């Protein structure tokens, strides 16, 4: 434990879930578990006593749930919070509660590793922003250079991709998958199978009348978020700029 850089508390009423987080954390020796909790009351007492840097927090626990823990202690006095849950419908509430990430059980190793990288960036008080880049879109009369910060979202159009800047769009002969490899590290996230969204341009996340999550963009567009992308997309919005 002497080599541990950051202290972790794991809170879940299921022993198997706590054990699973410990096993995943074993690959990250700079993080060390200093305590485990079975319910919200234990969490509140442990936060006061152990003062951890990170809290893996189950949402549905006996008596006091994860959201109530944050409400009672206040967001300002919480460590970095990663929510754990078996359900995806709490993603927006987790975003509003200022959680760093939202993991849906069972958690895969790759998804967990992405969370740990976010935690490192947060705990190290941020990293340098990626360089500004641009996409050159050939047109009939030459080409247009679009800085990535100008693009609001990108949608698939067969073997092409349609780049939206406000109410204008530009067609690029490149698949959405190819574009994702280029822009994913510069603040774009997959919203659903046919759309990428610039996270900095998301104004709000909302539930539509049909029960689906949608992203409201600063440009006025509305982009649906697929069920399998909800938790990861909401976490990306919450952690923009980290």
Image (cartoon, grey):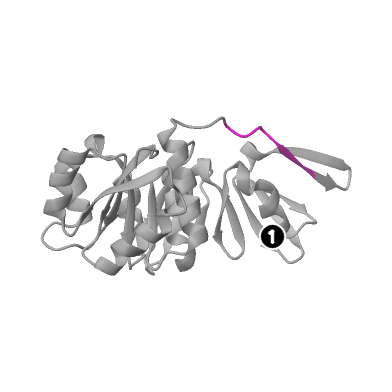
Give the magenta part as a residue range. 129-136
Residue 190, located in which quarter of the rendered image? Answer: bottom right
- Judging by the rendered image, the residue that carries numbered circle 1 is 177
Q: Is residue 21 above or below residue 55?
A: below
Residue 100 percent across, percent down from the top left: 38, 46
- For label 1, the SS is helix
Q: Is residue 108 above or below residue 216?
A: below
Q: Is residue 66 above or below residue 240?
A: below
Q: Can residue 28 be seen here?
A: yes
Q: Say whether residue 171 is left or right of residue 142.
A: left
Q: Is residue 28 above or below residue 87?
A: above
Residue at 41% across, 54% down: 25
Residue 201 percent across, percent down from the top left: 52, 42
* Residue at the front extreme of this rendering: 2
Q: Quadrant of the N terminus?
A: top left
Q: How many marks?
A: 1
Residue at 80% across, 56% down: 173
Q: Say whether residue 62 is left or right of residue 19.
A: left
The question of residue 134 being in magenta is answered with yes
The question of residue 99 being in magenta is answered with no
Residue at 79% across, 39% down: 144
* Residue at the right extreme of this rendering: 141
User: Mark 1: few, some, or many residues within 10 Å (few <14, many ≥20)?
Assistant: some
Residue 147, located in which quarter of the rendered image? Answer: top right
Residue 151 percent across, percent down from the top left: 63, 43
Residue 242 percent across, percent down from the top left: 47, 37
């Amino acid at each position: 434990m002497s080599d541990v850089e950051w202290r972790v508390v794991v809170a879940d009423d299921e022993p198997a879930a706590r054990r699973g987080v410990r096993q995943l954390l074993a690959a990250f020796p700079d993080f060390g578990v200093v305590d485990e909790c079975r319910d919200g009351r234990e969490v509140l007492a442990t936060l006061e006593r152990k003062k951890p840097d990170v809290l893996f927090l189950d949402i549905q626990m006996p008596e006091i749930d994860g959201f109530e823990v944050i409400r009672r202690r206040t967001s300002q006095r919480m460590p970095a919070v990663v929510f754990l849950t078996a359900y995806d419908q709490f993603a927006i509430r987790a975003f509003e509660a200022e959680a760093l990430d939202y993991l849906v059980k069972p958690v895969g190793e790759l998804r967990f590793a992405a969370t740990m990288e976010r935690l490192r960036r947060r705990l190290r008080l941020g990293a340098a922003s990626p360089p500004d880049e641009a996409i050159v879109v050939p047109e009939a009369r030459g080409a247009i250079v679009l800085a990535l910060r100008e693009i609001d979202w990108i949608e698939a159009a067969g073997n092409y991709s349609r780049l939206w800047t406000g109410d204008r769009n530009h067609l690029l002969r490149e698949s959405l998958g190819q574009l994702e490899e280029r822009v994913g590290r510069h603040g774009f996230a997959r919203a659903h199978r046919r759309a990428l969204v610039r996270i900095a341009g998301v104004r709000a996340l909302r539930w539509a009348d049909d029960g689906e999550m949608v992203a409201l963009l600063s440009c006025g567009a509305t982009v649906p978020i697929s069920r399998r992308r909800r938790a990861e997309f909401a976490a990306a919005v919450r952690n923009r700029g980290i």
